[in-house]
Amino acid sequence: MKNRQPLFHVVKRDQAGPGRQLLAYVAAVVLALAVGAMLLSVQDVEPVTFYRQMLTMGIPGSRYPWRAVENFIRLFVPLLIVSLALALAFKMRFWNIGGEGQFIIGAICAGWAAMKLGESLPRPLVVVLMALCGALGGGLYGVFVAALKVRFGTNETLLTLMLNYVALYILQFFAETKADWNFFLDLESARPKFAKFPDNAQMLTIPIGPFNLNLSLVAAVVLCVLIFVYLNYTKRGYEIAVVGDSPNTARYAGMKVGKIIIRTIFLSAALIGMAGAFHVSSAGILSASVTNDVGWTGVVVAWLAKLNTVGIVVASLLITVLQFGCQTASTTYPSIDANFANLLQGVILFIVLAADFFTRFKLVTRSKTGKEAAK
């Protein structure tokens, strides 16, 4: 009986230049927007008008355009920091899918600092302590998984995924348990409701006319520079790349792989926890939906940018424009749900990943494969 060969084979292409890859990504985004335009047309929405409002985020013609920019920054900063933090772990082939949980634990720890210290310490000190508590809480929550992987070889994808739900239920416990000890809640409210943080726990801002520049944006930009330098110009950044390529090679070179894994995952999770602290400090309150799915979206951003620091900044900016712009534009059209941003984001991701695949590989038919083998 003859061995049946598959009709198609996947063959790796020659290395595509950056210009060709960029062209493929631009074409993929245009195609995704065309698909979105068809979905909008089905709902009797003029696509060009909708996309114009989405990309401008409703700023032109607004009476208070600076408020739109301030709200945009509050969404952009957590996504940027989480995406950078996840890229640290992914470069080491440690699949940290626990961004949601680490963000929540960081927000809870920051909330503790706000409620306990917000009325007794100066505002700058309280904000710094909130960031440190959030980083410590998120870091410890993440390093627990890293320690189990180093010691017992556990699956980090499964563990970080499950710990997301553990953190979510912890947050729900604080949100729904009305008791004297639960200082997170407003005890004067008849229903369980999170209390607002003291004024000294609010994120610092720099007034520029009517616009208030959120200092978390400055902190995020500084973190981008530090992470770029850390990954590309330090010994520890080089160790992350080596461990990601081949743990056995790293061991042969004398590197302590377990120590590198624990150190890197603590840093990754700590940055995510700090992002949670920045978010609740900017919002001035905890909430049951504190993450805004930033842990999942950060995975998308990191992979779209191919774990490149500069690419993550660009992708985070574009995804935030997409999300915030769709929310703004959807208020004009009752037929469009605010979750249309998630649909459009999924379409863009799918088509961009397909474009990335076909820039690196090609499908060859059975006959062509036989001719190439004969040559």
Image (cartoon, grey):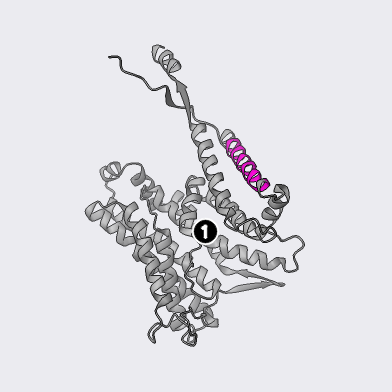
For the N terminus, give its image quadrant: top left
For image coordinates 64% across by 55% down, the residue present is: 336
For image coordinates 53% across by 51% down, the residue present is: 312
Q: How far from the left and from the top, in percent, is residue 370?
A: 40, 14
Relative depth, front residue between 325 and 281: 325
**What residue did someone put label 1 on?**
79
SS majority, magenta? helix
Q: Is residue 288 visible?
A: yes
Q: Is residue 302 above or below residue 136?
A: above
Give the residue furthest to the left. Answer: 152
Q: How far from the left and from the top, in percent, is residue 93?
A: 36, 47
Q: How far from the left and from the top, in percent, is residue 291?
A: 48, 64
Q: Is residue 357 above or below residue 374?
A: below
Tell me if residue 6 is in the magenta stretch: no
User: Would you identify the image quadrant in which residue 351 lies?
Assistant: top right
For image coordinates 44% across by 73% down, the residue present is: 110
What is the span of residues highlighted in magenta in the rendered image?
A: 22-41
Relative depth, front residue between 98 and 42: 42
Badge 1 local density, few (<14 within 10 Å), some, or many (20+)?
Answer: many
